[in-house]
Image: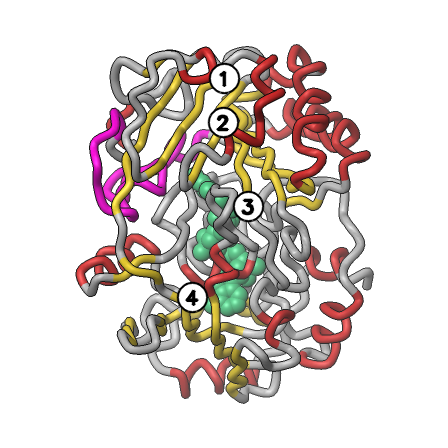
Amino acid sequence: MTLSNWAGNTTFHAKDLHHPTSLDELQRLVAGSAAVRALGSAHSFNHVADTDGDLVVLDKMPDQVEIDSAAATVRVGARTTYATLAPLLHRAGFALANLASLPHISVGGSVATGTHGSGDAVRSLAAAVSGIELVTADGSLLSLSRGDADFPGAVVSVGALGVVTSLTLDLVPAFELRQYVREGLREDALAHFDEIMSSGYSVSLFTDYRDTRVWLKREEELDSPDWYGTTPADGPRHPLPAMPADSCTAQLGVPGPWYERLPHFRADYPPSGAGDELQSELLVPRRHAVEALRALFAIGGRIRPVLQISEVRSIAADDLWLSPFNGRDSVGIHFTWVKDVAAVMPVLELVEETLAPFEPIPHWGKLFTRWPECPASFRALARRLDPTGKFANEFTRVLLGE
Ligand SMILES: Cc1cc2nc3c(=O)[nH]c(=O)nc-3n(C[C@H](O)[C@H](O)[C@H](O)COP(=O)(O)OP(=O)(O)OC[C@H]3O[C@@H](n4cnc5c(N)ncnc54)[C@H](O)[C@@H]3O)c2cc1C
């Protein structure tokens, strides 16, 4: 079989692709397989989801979106996308506290890699998980809830512990936001980094280390003509400067529901560069943000030839063992590269070397070459739940030091 990821830079090596239609069928499949992994919506840029055995996609499992209004939670099937889930929550008067830049991705796959949006006070999408159910190596169903000893290890799992069938997510009351794009942020405005990043519910900087624009998502109107020396964009903008903004969520301060403002990209269009790109992201503790960004501005001339755009986001700390945000308020420094692996890899290595003093942890679903130390607690949990390495692949073997 030939199956590739969204960007087309990774081909999966699985012998067989399965679409189980029931929990029972999935459990029998996992129990009888020597090597198996789940695939979400295939938006990761590396081999994290790959296996040379059985690849399982849960898109034929019964639809499951169960809102518990009293508890303010929703239980969803792992293959459900945020694009499907968010409008249902909104209609019921609820929201998720945060979303990524695109809604096309599955809840299970996003949570497994620690996917995040931006916001000083908001955490990663995984931090909203309060309960998780997974089929483990012997085919049995394991159910864990926040407060259980293994729970913080089981949420951001990179698929190494089993096939997640459902997740329960915390909800907040539905809310509205306005989205503004401001242009011309000067490098010396980094001196005001903390104030700028806290100016909205969700703030992102898009930069090529020369020209910087700010995506500002907040409840209140922004009518300052000279906000940190920037000017308001005179029309809708795409984060990739050369692209038309048709695929982007409404800007120019028009208020709208959380799920049509928090993502940069609309659910009904292909996101970002429509697959014509590679991505990397390094997460550094918030206290290093300005120094780390200055170091990258200093090598901007070497980054730009293979860069489409960088995005800088803030993410609040969580307590999930494998999460890049575990115990640390963080800043994500993301790179949308041109789609040329040979040209990009040396520059990625330069970026990794430049950021090395700032305790970086890579985004598990994007391209990287430097592996951080795996938390011993996660390694022990993976060995206990999967003693024969049924869910192991090349990615997890390197991560777990095997
Ligand atoms: C255009 C674009 C924009 C992006 N924007 C952002 C962003 O704003 N923020 C951000 O943090 N990331 C972003 N990403 C990265 C993306 O969010 C992650 O790669 C995410 O993991 C994709 O989810 P997925 O469902 O496609 O997962 P997949 O790539 O399919 O899988 C990822 C991992 O999850 C595991 N997995 C999937 N389903 C299950 C399951 N049911 N049980 C167990 N394990 C499972 C897989 O085995 C694999 O290890 C972006 C990617 C693209 C292509």
* Residue drawn at x 60%, y 53% as measured from the top left: 317
Q: Amino acid at mark 1?
A: Thr
Amino acid type of the residue tagged 4 in the rendering: Val
Name the residue tied to disc 4. Answer: 57
Disc 4 to disc 1, how far (Cα)? Answer: 39 Å
Q: Tell whether circle 3 marks a residue whose Cβ is less than 8 angstroms from ligand 1.
A: no
Q: Is residue 52 left or right of residue 16?
A: right
From the image, tell me which residue sits under label 3. Answer: 315
Report the residue marked by disc 2. Answer: 205
Considering the numbered disc 2 on the image, is that residue within a helix, a strand or a loop? strand
Q: Residues within 10 Å of mark 2 (few under 14, many from 20)?
A: many
Q: Is residue 396 left or right of residue 192?
A: right
Q: Earlier in the sequence, mark 3 or mark 4?
A: 4
Q: Give the mark, 4 or 2, whose residue is nearer the N terminus.
A: 4
Task: Nearest to the eye among marks 3 and 4: give it.
Answer: 3
Residue 164 image point, x, y percent: 49, 73
Q: Secondary structure at mark 1?
A: strand
Q: Is residue 354 above or below residue 376?
A: above
Disc 1 target residue: 212
Contact check, label 4 and label 1, Cβ < 8 Å? no
Please tell me whether the stretch drawn in magenta is mainly helix, strand or loop. loop
Q: Mark 1 or mark 2, which has the lower sequence index?
A: 2
